[in-house]
Structure formats: C-alpha cells, structure tokens
Image: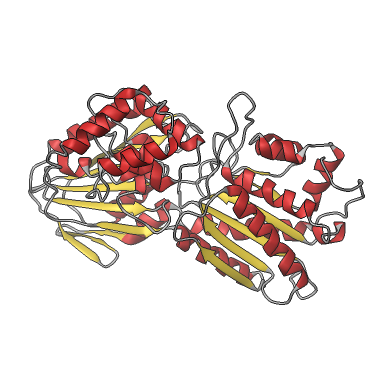
Amino acid sequence: MTSPRSRFNQPDANPTLTRQAREIWQAGVDAVKADRLLSASLRFDHQSIEIGDHSFPLRSDGRLLVVGAGKAAAAMAAGLRDAYLRGDCSVALDGLVLIPAGTERATEPIALHVGRPAGVNEPTAEAVQGTRRILQRVSQLDPQDTCIALISGGGSALLALPAEGLTLEDKLATIRFLSSHGANIEQLNTVRKHLSAVKGGKLAAACLAETLITVVISDVLGDPLDLIASGPTVPDSSTPTEAIKLLTKFDTERSLPPSVYRVLEQASADPGDAGDYPPHGCAIVLANNATAVDAAGVQAERLGWQHAMQSARKSEGSAEQVGQHLARMAIHMLRNPGPNCLITGGEPTVTLAPAERRGKGGRNQQLVLAAMQTLFQSPDVSPADRARLVILSGGTDGEDGPTDAAGAWLDADVWRRAENAGLDLDQALARNDAYSFFDACGGLIHTGPTHTNVCDIRVVLVQREESPSG
C-alpha cells in the first residue's frame, strides 16, 4: 500500500469497537424502516384517513387509489396496507407503485411494478411503462375519490417519462453526464423535472381526485418537497431557465444531445399551463436523515458512548472532503477530552474519473478511503492510534453507487489486510475504485435492500480509557 513511511506491524482491531459502530449505524437505518413508519402513522376508518396530526375525509361513494415510487415504495405500501386492514374502512383499496428489483414484498391489493434492476439507479423502459400506467390510473379518478402518493428516494429513476421531443436515451445521457461531473441531488433533480412529463408536479396535475395525500420519506437534505423524487405531486419552484443555467455550468462544451437544450429552451420561451392541482391534500414528511441520525445517537448513548451528532441541511461538497474532515475529527477525538463518538448524516458528491480508467465504487466507499488516506498521511497517528478508532459510512438504502455494498468501514484489521496485500490506496482513490480496495481487505458493508432511503449515516468511534469496552 502506498505509504510515506516503512511498513510496520499493525495491532489487532478492537472487535467491540467495530461491532458497536455497525450497531449504531444500523439503529439509524432501523428507525426509518418504511413499513413500520407507515403502519404506525396511518389510521383508517369508514369516514377518514389520519396521518400523524392530519385528518382527511374519506367518502363512502369514492375509491381509494395508492400510487408511488422509490426505493422504499414497496415497504411503504406494505405498511399502508397493514394500517388499512387494521382499520374499519369500507372504501375499496387499490393501487400501483414502482419499485427497484429486490424490494418486492406482499402488498396486495396494491400492485408492484419493477421499474429497474437492483443496483442500476437509472430510468429504464420498464420504468417508463409503469409511469404511463400510473398516469392513466390517476387521470381516470373522479372528484370524490382519494389518491395517496407514496414517495421516497430513488423515485426519480422510477417515475420516468421523457418530455415530448426527448427519448429515454437523451435523458440517460443527461443524468449520467451531470452525475459524473459532480452535480448534487438538487442540481440533478432541477434538470430532471424540466425534461420530464411526470416530475415537477405533473403527476398531481394529471390526478382528477379532489384529495391527493403525498406521504414522503425524504432523501434530500432539508426536505425540499419539489426535489424529493423530483417532486411529482407538488408545485415546482424552479424554472426551465434555471435548468438551462445548470446545464451550461456543467456542459461547457455543449456536448449533450441538442434535443435536451431544444426542449428546455422551448419550455423557457413558452412555459404553458402547469395544470390544476387537486384542491385538497398535502405532503407529509414521515422521516428524513435527521430522524436516522437521532436514532443512531440514542443507540450510541445506550451503549455508553459520549456522542456528538450532526445532520446536514444542505449539500456537503465532495465525498473526499467529508472523509478528510471525519479523519481530522477522529484525530482530535484521540487527543482531546469530550465526545468519543461522532455521528453525522448527509449526502456528498463524487466527481468521477474518466471512464477508461474508472474503477468501481460509491460515495460512502470513496469517503472512507479518503479518510484512510488522511490518517495515513498524518505523521502523528501511530499504529496504536489506528487500533483505537473506527470510521464507518453507509447509505441507508443499502446501495452505494453501482455496487452491491451500502458503504465501507475502516478499522485496524482493514488497515493490516490492505497493507499486507500491498494495495495502492492513492490509485484506488484517484480511480474511484474504493469497492475493489475494500473488497480485498474486508471493509465493505453488505445489507441488501433496506426498504428505506434517507441519505447516508457516518459513525466515528474512538476508544479511550473512559470508553465502553463491551
């Protein structure tokens, strides 16, 4: 492994430290499991639907249709169905939600439509087909009907229908270009909305029921409703002109398909009528990144750690910068009294290496690798120090980039295996090949689909004399 100094023998990792870091992270994920949230938050009777502190009348001569999309959509549908069956509701339940492969579960009578393969967070022809079916269903409702939209992160790739004048390939080229050039989720979804026939409130405009209730599990920092899954059921706060400015910022050589610019320029010149929105209803955020970070903090306290917590409210910058910051915080915690556990949440970006030299990885794996590099280059961090800390970062959805891992962790055992294998840390970081690096030294987090999605959780633990030992 690339190193500014000679090789040395690493002390063994503290298995309790690593296990508890994982337990703290998992507690955050468990707190935002969509089926539990929906089942606990919804109450049905023959006259109304109650969601938290909100109550909506339910007409006996109407229908109840559930639609939605996202990584948590199947679990949300399952939780809603459980609440419906538990209640005393005479209105028939029906629905269709779009989900990624691998998240299927029992949701009848709400149907599931698999819109993309696992690990491929991009629109597909199957997603377009499912989106057309949902638009058809909501446009056939009557005013006395009620529609519930279940929206979670990952919905942008599943509720997918290119605007007139665009092909699916045009949209894919745009999404891939922006993602690979470091666009954050706010920038990406702003452009997506104006290239879509369903995003940016267009699903709501197509809905003919008077009551539309949107239930949200948020994967966008700060919970801007028009950006979560690109806001299919809420009014759009952005304009086509803003989308053009964002494209111009990233696509300086105007290399994207001309049709993309043509559609945006036409929309900017003639915005048209956005359509009427259902007069009754609202959007309710049931969980977000702060919910998960708070729950992780509760678990840390239960285990005896003195913790500090922070959930980002806006885009954080690059994964490398966040990883470097966490490494510096770990060094500070090693040397100073105060918290010995740091829990943070957010969603950084990654600027990808050129395709011809790019490896495999995701933002959480890249973040932990950047933290490892910072610690490695720090002259005052000894092998003994490395045995007293763990840095872990994982996506709450169980997916990290185009990989089967949720993220990665760093402890003394990972250090030792990486060094014994002669892995090149600097090259792996430069090539976005963190997955291969951590796969070789046993530092990947594998969970499979978690049935939720509220960005990322990071945990830093530092073992001091006053720290728990098991």
Q: Position of residue 93 (x, y in %)?
A: 22, 44
Locate residue 55 relative to residue 377 in the image: left or right: left
- The answer, for residue 136, to whether it is visible in the render is yes
Residue at the image point whose x is 64% and y is 58% from the top: 325
Q: Is residue 88 above or below residue 182?
A: below
Residue at screen point 30% across, 56% down: 86
Up-down: is 287 above or below 300?
A: above
Q: Is residue 345 left or right of residue 56?
A: right
Query: Which residue occupies the foreground of this view, 299 or 440?
Result: 440
* Residue 207 visible within the image: no
Q: Residue at x 68, y 56 (%)?
A: 391
What is the x, y in percent for residue 434? 67, 39
Q: Position of residue 150 (x, y in %)?
A: 31, 47
In depth, the one of 48 and 208 nearer the eye is 208
> Quadrant of the rendered structure where residue 458 is?
bottom right
* Number of marks in the rendered image: 0
Closer to the camera, 366 or 117?
Answer: 366
Horizontal arrangement in the rendering, residue 208 relative to residue 121 (left or right): left
Residue at 72%, 69% (x, y): give it: 333
Where the C terminus falls, by quadrant? bottom right
The residue positioned farthest toward the front in the image shown: 253
> In the rendered image, which quarter contains the N terminus?
top right
Give the image location of residue 270, x and y in percent.
15, 36
